[in-house]
Image (cartoon, rainbow, N blue to C red):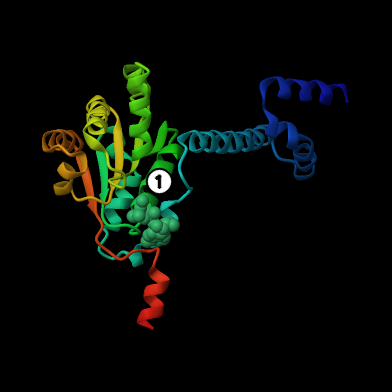
Amino acid sequence: MADVVRLKNHLETLGLDTILGIFEEETKKALETKISYTEYLARLMAEEIITKTDRSINYKIRIARFSQIKTIEEFDFRFQPQLDERLIKELCELVFLEKAKNVLFVGPPGVGKTHLAIGIGIKACEKRKKVLFADAGKMIEELMLSMIEKTLPQKIERLARYDLLVIDELGYMCVGKEGANLLFQLISRCYEKVSIVLTSNRSFSQWGDMFGDNVIASAILDRLLHHSFVVQINGKSYRIKDKLTEKDG
Ligand code: ADP
Ligand code: MG
């Protein structure tokens, strides 16, 4: 009995909470099934690793601040037949991230750009990468605030410490020259160092109008596109798919 108390204290000290919760039951089972000491220990350790891994992935997903949780597995590729499923699956392998390349999802509303961007972001969290999701408009607002507070360099350095920045919905809000300039500074800093997954409902030819400045638009595009995968989605909106079916039917 004293041994059990001592063991419990040790497990608690080491933070091996899963083993602490299951070892008594597992000891009983081990005695009944006569498994070896080694196997018994290996079993307990495996359980601890599983919970610890889950916890650290959940933590990564939480701090990434995704607007919603959407996985690639939930994505219905049959609904978007023109989309290259193989390319998306390849992107999920995250080789692009190791090479600090970018991924740009471009297309009209509702085709799944944000869903896919988040799905890839979650895959990166599962590989213990440091990910941050941000709405483009909010990201630019935050950069502006930092500029006003004279902390812009620090803010950009902080963002450059991530492995992956997911910048969502560029184009919904009017960006303006100043916003474009700030975005340019961030994107230049990340160039060939930090991967960016970006979604936009505006085609590249419209970026000049979106930023109110053709020069800055091409400077941003130049850096974003140099090492990148561009996924153009032209299909139907998933948001109104039921309405389309009703009409078709
Ligand atoms: P976008 O960013 O292109 O406007 P979203 O990714 O926000 O579109 O998609 C709109 C909604 O439809 C989301 O709830 C998303 O999960 C869902 N959705 C879009 N395309 C698909 C798809 N092919 N399979 C499953 N859900 C989808
Ligand atoms: Mg979107």
Q: Amino acid at mark 1?
A: Ile
Question: Which residue is more in the foreground, 44 or 143?
Answer: 143
Q: Is residue 87 visible?
A: yes
Ligand 1 is found in the corner quadrant, namely bottom left
Q: Position of residue 81 (x, y in %)?
A: 28, 66
Q: Is residue 106 left or right of residue 59?
A: left
In the displayed orientation, state which residue is furthest to the left. Answer: 215
Q: Residue at x 41, y 53 (%)?
A: 72
Q: Residue at x 37, y 25 (%)?
A: 145
Q: Is mark 1 within 8 Å of ligand 1?
A: yes
- Up/down of 152 relative to 110, above or below: above
Q: Residue at x 40, y 39 (%)?
A: 124
Q: Position of residue 24 (x, y in %)?
A: 79, 36
Q: Residues within 10 Å of mark 1 (few under 14, many from 20)?
A: many
Q: Residue at x 35, y 59 (%)?
A: 110
In the displayed orientation, state which residue is furthest to the bottom. Answer: 249
Disc 1 is placed on an element classified as helix
**Quadrant where the N terminus is found in the figure:** top right
Q: Is residue 34 left or right of residue 77?
A: right
- Up/down of 179 relative to 189, above or below: below
**Quadrant where the C terminus is found in the figure:** bottom left
In the displayed orientation, state which residue is furthest to the right. Answer: 1
- Up/down of 232 relative to 129, above or below: below
Q: Position of residue 55 (x, y in %)?
A: 57, 35
Q: Position of residue 51 (x, y in %)?
A: 61, 37
Which residue in the protein does label 1 denote? Answer: 118
